[in-house]
Amino acid sequence: MDKWKPGASIGALKRRAQMMASIRHFFSRRSVLEVDVPLLSSSTVTDINIESISAKVGGSKGYLQTSPEYFMKRLLASGSGDIYSMSKAFRDGEVGSKHNPEFTMLEWYRCGWDEHQLIDEVIELISSVISAPENVTIDITKISYIDCFVDHVGVDPQDADLDRLQEIAAGLASESWSEETRENCLDLIFSLKVEPQLPLGIAIIYDYPECQSALAQFGVNNAGQKVSRRFEVFLNRMEVGNGYLELTDADEQRLRFNRDCINREKSKKSPVNIDIKLLAALEAGLPSCAGVAIGVDRLLMNEAESNSIDEVVSFSWLRC
């Protein structure tokens, strides 16, 4: 491989430019403001499953941002109204056919919307920017996390004992999973047993288990079970997006940050400081809103029927 050359063909780069222009046109027609937020900050996410890339800034430690989320929420709390960002994001330890440490993320927030209103807009956006043969429509499926888990695994993820989930995870991977957390076991089982069987086209999975709330509000489903008001977007069985009815309670957010920090310490992950500016924004008043992040590179991979992110970006990490 001539590593000085771009991974993407010139045709793929032109299609990339066309898709990004289509995305901007989509939001311009809806009067959603494009915002440009910092890629470098003095704080970062506490999520145990995400590792940030650190940098030295004037003798102090900084971080390349894993998403524009925290800065965008500070704008929302300042009265920005509906906003979107399409820019680079960075995550350490993510190099592979579907991952690059630097990638393009589209993220947007709709004030006064719930997650299901935003799901409808996500479907509109993907359907409008993905090229499809004439007279061919993209199949769309919406299903709750619990229903698709029961369909393909045979157990209710809400009611199953942790021992049972650990047993299933260990059977799919290794015996070490018999000691894993409920959240991690569910992630593994879903990725290995459910994702490969999702319907083709756009599949929206909503109402995630309580333990997978991330930055989403809690809710109650039709069965009276406590769930996270979160959804994930799959395109031809590849995850391309993650959205929430956003948490606006500063006290609850502080509790989740602290829990993350404890879990990071237990797992011997690098310690990070809680983003106190985000908490201050929540305390000042984050408006009720729904938000979603979409991986632009993965949209391009799906459209090109490519198995490698290297083929849709100019220079992946392997060529840098």
Image: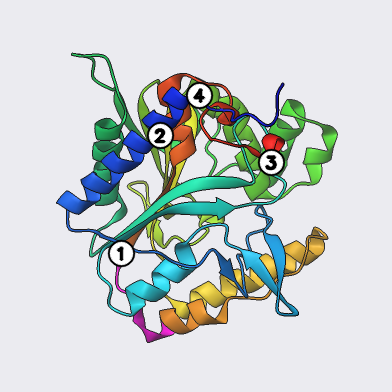
Choose between 193 and 54: the one closer to the eye.
54
The colour scheme applied to this rendered structure is rainbow
Along the line of sight, which residue is nearer the eye, 240 or 4? 4
- Tag 2: amino acid: Arg
- Mark found first going from the N terminus, 1 or 4: 4
Question: Which label was assigned to residue 9?
Answer: 4
Tag 3: amino acid: Cys
Q: Residues within 10 Å of mark 1 (few under 14, many from 20)?
A: many
Q: Identify the mark nearer the N-term, 4 or 2.
A: 4
Q: Is residue 140 above or below residue 105?
A: above
Q: Residue lying furthest front in this view?
A: 4
The label number, if any, that marks residue 320 in the structure image: 3
Q: Amino acid at mark 4?
A: Ser
Structural distance between the alpha carbons of marks 1 and 4: 39 Å
Q: What's the CA distance linking mark 1 and mark 3?
A: 38 Å
Label for residue 16?
2
Mark 2 and mark 3 lie on one chain; the one further toward the N terminus is: 2
Residue at image coords 75%, 27%: 171
- Between the residue at mark 2 and the residue at mark 3, the CA separation in whole angstroms equals 19 Å
In the displayed structure, would residue 156 be above or below residue 110?
above
Label 4 – label 2 distance at C-alpha: 11 Å
In the image, the segment drawn in magenta is 283-289
Q: Amino acid at mark 1?
A: Cys
Mark 1 or 3, which is nearer the eye? 3
- Name the residue that disc number 1 marks: 289
**Left or right: where 319 falls relative to 204:** right
Relative horizontal placement of residue 90, taking residue 75 as reference (left or right)? right
Q: Give the residue at x 27% y 39%.
A: 22
Q: Secondary structure at mark 3?
A: loop
Classify 10 Å Cα crowding around label 4: few (below 14), some (14-19), many (20 and above): some
Between disc 1 and disc 3, whose residue precedes? Answer: 1
| Residue 230 visible in the picture | no
